[in-house]
Every structure is written in C-alpha cells, then in structure tokens.
Image (cartoon, rainbow, N blue to C red):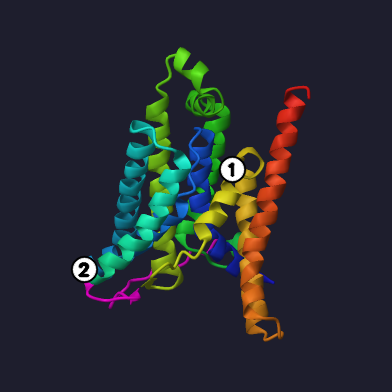
Amino acid sequence: MTDILSASVRIATPILLAALGGLLCFRAGVFNIGLEGMMLIGSLAGVAGVIWSNGSVWAGFLTAIAAGVLVAELFAFASIRLRANYIIVSLAINMLALGLTSFLLKAIFQTTGALRPPVINKLPDIDIPLLSKLIGKQSIVTYFGILVVLIVRFVMRHTHVGIKIQSVGEAPETAVTCGIKTDRIKTVMLLICGALCGLAGAYLSTVTVSEFTENMVSGRGFTAFTAGGFCGSNPIVTFLVSLLLGFAEAAGIRLEIMNTGMSPSIVKMFPYLLALVVYALGTSIRNATVRRKSGG
C-alpha cells in the first residue's frame, strides 16, 4: 500500500504545482488553460539547465522557472495588454510550446524526439520519520508544493492581498472603482503560475524520468487545470484532487504491470476519465453554490 501511495504522490506533484498556478489565475479572473504549454516549455528548459550546468538539478529548476515566467509574460502581454481572448491565447501558448520545443531540440541540441543529459546529479529524497512510513521518501519539490498549498490558503483567507485578488476575479468593476490595479494583479498571478508550471515541467523531466521527450507532459496540464478549478479553487481541495488524480494514474500503471489482460489504452484513460468526472462535479458544486448565494 505504501508503494502505491508513494507513486501517487510522485505523480501528483507536477499536477499539484501547475494546478496551484491555475488556481491563482482563476481567483484573479484569468481563464488559463495554457498550463500544458507552460509545463512543456519548463520540461525542456529543465533538461537544458542541467546540461549547461554539467548536471545540476537546481540549475535545471531555475532555468525552467525562468522559462515558465517568460511564457507567462507573453500570455499576460497578449491577454491583458492587448485584450486578446484568454482561451485563444491559452490555445496559442499550447500550440507554440509543441512547435517551439521540437524546433529548439533540433536547433540547439541537434537532436529530435528526446534529449537526455549526459550527467544529472539527482537530489536525494527527504525522509520525514512519520510521514515517510505512509508515502515513502519524497523529493523536496513535493514538500515545496505542499508548502505552497498552505501559503495560498493563508494568503487568500487572511490577508488584504488575498482579498484584492479575489475581488479582481469576482467583481473587477468594483475593484477598479476601489482603486485596485486589476491588470497588475492579473499579471503577477500569471507570472507566479508560469513559475510553478515551469517547476512542474522540470520535475517531470529531471526528477521523474531524467530526460525530455517531445510532448512529454501528455495532458497533465489539462488535468491540472481541472484540479485547480475544482470547487471554487480551494487550495486544500486542489491538493486532495491532485492526489486523487495521481492515485488514478498510479493504479493504472500498476494494473498494466500486473498484466491483468486489460487493454493498455483503457488503463491510460483512467486519470483523464477521472479528471472529466471531477471537472463536471466541481462545476455542478460551484453552480449550486452560486444559486444558493443568490437566493435562487
């Protein structure tokens, strides 16, 4: 049982990081489904940073964060400065990431398909006495993700900054009337989202598999969007949903390894089917909450 829980947490880590970024955007009124593209750029940047630093994973993380912020800045410029539609910009970011990563693989590293660092100095997993008995040893990135959950919850519930962010998302006209700089808040939330998505991508390529492959994110960004928007974007719920999605993928992998006779295609559908159910359930709960608050 510990093995599958450990695998679930490892798989859930990049989903959680990207979901928290999406949650912040959602709270600020930015409909960002470009998490997939930001993660993919971060995946390549992470491996590139490791190669350029002769094996440092920390350099890979920092390079990926910087790349994610740059992509988020592009998103902010198009959607906030130029007032382009959020969905159109998100789709453009996702398509740009697919093409750009393939181009950079060939242009910079003279390879196609995959890129593996010749040397990578893996970070040791952290052993927390009681917790490790339940979920095993985990990467420092995993514990950082949990810390971000707690920080986001505290900021949103107990600070003036959190109130401003939520007012921008829920009542932008009122926020402007109160003198809140809505565009600045949206931009900052997008940049934080880009940083988290970049780190999530680097986790995939430098911690999980130690290489970059084209389109390696494989829908995790859309899964993260589902987790981030569930039940009114509550960070604790986002954390739990991310774990649930990670468990679904880990269980699917375990079933495939056990050779149960089930089609691999069906097994791989598990986390995405669950994401669809979660999104539908979350939308239903949000709508019911809105109707209840409005007295309808």
Residue nearest the viewer, comparing 52 with 81: 81
Task: Name the residue rendered at 37%, 28% in the picture.
Answer: 184
Residue 235: mark: 1
Q: Quadrant of the N terminus?
A: bottom right
Q: Is residue 214 above or below residue 184?
A: below
Q: Position of residue 224 (x, y in %)?
A: 54, 53
Residue 107: mark: 2
The amino acid type found where label 2 is placed reads Ala
Task: Name the residue rendered at 47%, 67% in the picture.
Answer: 125
Q: Could one spot residue 214 in this view of the protein?
A: yes
Is residue 153 highlighted in magenta? no
Q: Position of residue 9 (x, y in %)?
A: 58, 62
Q: Could one spot residue 45 in this view of the protein?
A: no
Q: Earlier in the sequence, mark 1 or mark 2?
A: 2
SS at badge 2:
helix
Is residue 114 highlighted in magenta? yes
Residue nearest the viewer, comparing 148 with 205: 205
Q: Is residue 157 above or below residue 266?
A: above
Residue 12: mark: none
Mark 1 vs mark 2: give the one in front. 2
